[in-house]
Image (cartoon, rainbow, N blue to C red):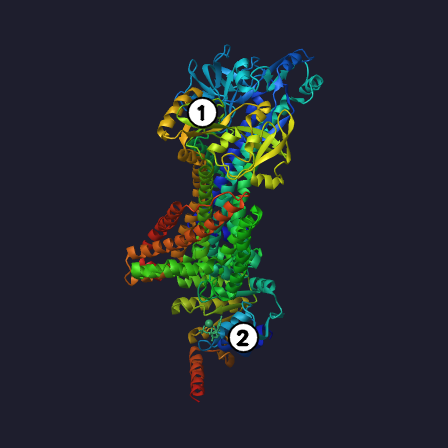
Amino acid sequence: MNASVRIGARSLLAHRRRLFGTVLSIVLGVAFLTGTMVLGDTLRANFDTLFADANAGTDAVVRSARVLDAPDVPGGIRAPLDESLTERLRTAPGVSAAEPSVQGAGQLIGADGKPVGGQGPPTLAGNWIDDPKLNPYRLAEGRAPAAPGEAVVNRGAAKAGGLEVGDSTVLRTPDPVRITVVGIATFGADADGMGPSTFTALTLADAQAHLTPKGSGQVSTVRLRSDSLSQRQLVDEVQKLLPDGVEALTGADATAQSTADVSGRFLSLFTTLLLVFAGVALLVATFTIHNTFAIVTAQRTRENALLRALGASRRQVLGTTLGEALAIGVLASALGLLGGFGVAAGLKALFAAIGFTLPTGGTVVHAATVLLPLLTGTLVAAASALVPALRAARTAPLAALRDTAVDASAQGRSAAVRKAVGALVLLGGLPAVVVGATRGPSLALTVGGALALLAGTVVLGPVAAVLAVRVLGAPLPRLRGVTGALARRNAARNPGRTAATATALMVGVAVVTLFTVFGASVKATLDDTVSRSFAGDLAVTAPATGAGGSGVSPKLAPAVAALPEVGTAVGLGRGAARIDGHGARLGVADPVALARVTDLGRVDGSLADLGTDGLAVSRPEAEAHGWRLGSTVQLQFTDTTAAFTVRALYAGGGVAGDYLISRPAWEPHRVQDADTLVVVALRPGVTVDQGKAAIGRIAAAYGSPQVQTRAEYAESSASGVDTMLSVVYALLALAVLIALLGIANTLTLAVHERTRELGLLRAVGQTRAQLRAVVRWESVLVAAFGTTGGLLLGALLGWALTRASDGAGTGSFALPLGRLAVVALVGPAAGVLAGLRPAARAAKLDVLRAVAGG
Amino acid sequence: MTAAARVEEAVKEYGAGETRVRALDGVSVEFAAARFTAVMGPSGSGKSTLVHCAAGLDTLSGGRAWLGETELSGLGDRELTLLRRERIGFVFQAFNLLPTLTVRENITLPLDLGGAAPDREWLDALIDVVGLGDRLQHRPSQLSGGQQQRVAVARALAGRPAVVFADEPTGNLDSRSGGEVLGLLRSAVDTVRQSVVMVTHDPAAAAYADTVLFLADGRLVDTVQQPTAERVLDRMKALDGRRGKAAAR
Ligand SMILES: Nc1ncnc2c1ncn2[C@@H]1O[C@H](COP(=O)(O)OP(=O)(O)OP(=O)(O)O)[C@@H](O)[C@H]1O
Ligand SMILES: [Mg+2]
């Protein structure tokens, strides 16, 4: 065996306890990375096979070529087709069967009266397609809907809503439709549904009545199959018969598109998010590992010097140290890979716990999912060990004879260089962050500045460590006497080490703080939006996020307005159009009435004059496009493109959004009508409670949307932020855990290194308890340093990110002091925990052996 | 007779400015081949510095050093490393062995580093002489101090280097263990014509040598051939006296 390899392997075995923390850091980081990738692979593959299986019988799909990209609708919004097209296609050459398909949004109400799903994935409704080969759903129980009011629901929705065959419930389309469940269906052969989405199938006539704009004679798509032609041939054949603006595509292409809509949009976002957190965990691990190697190498200076004296070349010493790191990297990555499968299951459970159930199915692992984490873990280990290994290779042979391991990172010439470089980077980063956040604002500049800040902080760490330990530890000697003084001096005596240890925690805490501040600011912005612009007393909404939900029935607002308790009730509808090449949301309302119950700020022009070709635009949006009163704007709808004139400008950032058009203007272009919000102003003398009760009674007949006070409405619009934050905290917990492991590990190594010294202290009468306290307080000091740095950095970056991502300049910034105080307390408290094991080991020292041994 | 190693007008200075120390002050010394040379002198006289520089562990500030025909002054780190690996054996006062390797692996370490196959017969003979045949698989921490130094000597001899340098190899040992280590070095000189240079403070140890060089204040001040412990002691006293007088003056 090669000498370097053998020496590396031996020292690896001999020091395996010391390297435990390193291995664990890599295992955790790699496990998280693997878990994320396995979950992504599995979900993607499941979606793929699911769609392919469910749509296997469909050879071609005919649909409108006019499509609007809408932010919330996967695949965009398409214009409907004329139903008569189905008949013509049925008799086309080569076509064996043609079935109309109607698709829209419909939210089921469960047996408990609560909406089923709607928090992210779509809630779909449509018609039951009678030809089983063309229907992606299969009946698992009961029968197909045959009479008005009969419905089939997918098995997942039935389970979630506690619905069984024979049950009656309501489907919000958003007009409430009373339905009786006559059957339960699977998506494809045996999936509970199309991913986590819900689906309710009605008869064709019912579906047309509730989901198409005209109420009859329209369909969304026509599905075809052919026994004689290939998919391509069928499409070519059918294409000849289609009117302008209608397209045919093969079943395979249609499936690929729906898969891409799901995997492309939702899954990539989802896995990217998780990968970011895996990245944070690995970054923190890098600091921890680097530190361990730096310490272990320093402790091994004599051995390395001896090797050099005996004729080991620099490269051999470098190879030994790096080889050791690589071996650890490979081993730990392999363990992490195994752990990753557990993590994948855990992540799934985490998302299920917040009501976001991911589709089930066999675990799928691609080669890349095995290779990438293995490679990343190994590289992280090797890269972390590179600088210590280079330092080891530079060991002078004579170091074997001298007392070594003097840390000069806070003094001397290299410290001067370090200070200069760190200060430069910091001085470059800070203005970049501030300018990026305030002028522009420019997200790229801010992020660049943030990275520079982080780098500067890392470089300046040792210098800051001395200062921080002095300041943070100032009360210790008074509080804890000699024990406290020793702890403080120990924390300061290896500033480089203390800084590197604390940096890991600092990065973790900084990211936690950043998200906390950013989340609080988003909440404050939402809150502000409501309190600034919502002038009504009550709001009626059907809370939903993402592509879920179906909104509030447009018939509700007039019904509420008719109540004697109510002064004004205005429904705010949601329209969509492409403006200047981008999909945009339109507010659809009676603008004058809306102005009475919401605060649109200063209005230039006249809201009363919108008519059917007028547009009201928020001032920031108008400025961004260079529009003024009287400008003409082209609005591309699903059916036509129409010219609108800007007739009013109002303040932005409110509940009304950026564009407002009147109901008559939207009417000809509407797809499936729904209000997102009904704003209610009560008559004078009516209490909020009375009003709430009265509206609640009426709302029951419209699918029971929620009636909320202003405060409740503000609260519920921000509730998604809290859910998001809890997920982020859970994901960041890993990074923080790795950082704490790093502290524990460094201290254990330090205890090992100071064996003689500790023995001496014990010999002159220090009790075990005192010894434990010294180590524990040192741990607390390091954790406090990391936490403080992280809080400062995170708060600054949180502020910058909030400002930089707020292009319109209407957002708010909030510093959630309560939550940050919790972080500030938890950090040092976790330091106590991290110090437990090293303290126990220090206390176990045998006095004689410690003094005599070496 | 050619010298196994020599230095000429060797100067070694440590530090700079106020704290400058001149450890070697223009020494010229020859270490004869196939001979046992002892280097003696008061503490701080530059003995360690001399052998370090002669062995390529450190570089001179002035003057020149040769190992056989090779001049060390011109060599870079790579060449010096190879030189130490292949042509020099070294025994320190303590911490000679890698704690993680076995006794046998420690002995063959320089050979392994160069990827050279050890000469089995020589190795077996060496292990036999060192008398640690039954301890080959042990770790250094399981050996006594004397045994550890014997292993270190065996390692220094294993590659049949041009010169073995030893810096107070018996400094930490009692006289019996020390005697064993010195006996090993002596027999290497006698049986395989090994050149050995040894720093020591102990007149009894110096008596094992063929020649004793005396250093003081970084200079060569005296040489004794075929020493006995008494003669060395006398010479040391004489030198001390001279130094004392010099100091008094
Ligand atoms: N790395 C160093 N830096 C500064 N001065 C040094 C260094 N190494 C040695 N010296 C100085 O050089 C002089 C000679 O030291 P050297 O170690 O060679 O003495 P020595 O004769 O081996 O002493 P001893 O018998 O105590 O081992 C001493 O004054 C010593 O302080
Ligand atoms: Mg010496």
Answer with left or right where residue B140 lies relative to residue B81: left
Answer with left or right where residue A781 lies relative to residue A611: left
Q: Is residue A721 above or below residue B144?
A: above
Q: Which mark is residue A632?
A: none
Whether the residue carrying mark 1 lies under 8 Å from ligand 1 is answered with: no
Answer with left or right where residue A602 lies relative to residue A759: right
| Discs 2 and 1 lie in a common subunit | no
Q: Amino acid at mark 1?
A: Ala
Which part of the image, by quadrant, shows the C terminus of chain A? bottom left
Tell whether label 1 touches label 2 (CB within 8 Å).
no
In the structure shown, which secondary structural element does the residue marked by tag 2 occupy?
Answer: strand
Report how far apart the C-alphas of labels 2 and 1 lie in the structure. 101 Å
Total marks in image: 2
- Percent position (x, y) of residue A500? 46, 54
Q: Residues within 10 Å of mark 2 (few under 14, many from 20)?
A: many
Chain letter of disc 2 in the image: B
Q: Amino acid at mark 2?
A: Lys
| Of B213 and A194, the residue lying toward us | A194
- Percent position (x, y) of residue A530? 45, 37
| Of A187 and A724, the residue lying toward us | A724
In the rendered image, is residue A854 in sight?
Answer: no
Q: Is residue B13 above or below residue A307?
A: below
Chain letter of disc 1 in the image: A
Q: Which mark is residue B12?
A: 2
In the rendered image, is residue A813 in sight?
Answer: yes
- Percent position (x, y) of residue B227? 47, 78
Residue at (44% x, 84% y) in the render: B243
Question: Which callout, 2 or 1, points to the residue nearer the camera?
Answer: 1
Whether the residue carrying mark 2 lies under 8 Å from ligand 1 is answered with: yes
Residue marked by disc 1? A561
- Percent position (x, y) of residue B89? 53, 65
In the structure shown, which secondary structural element does the residue marked by tag 1 occupy?
Answer: helix
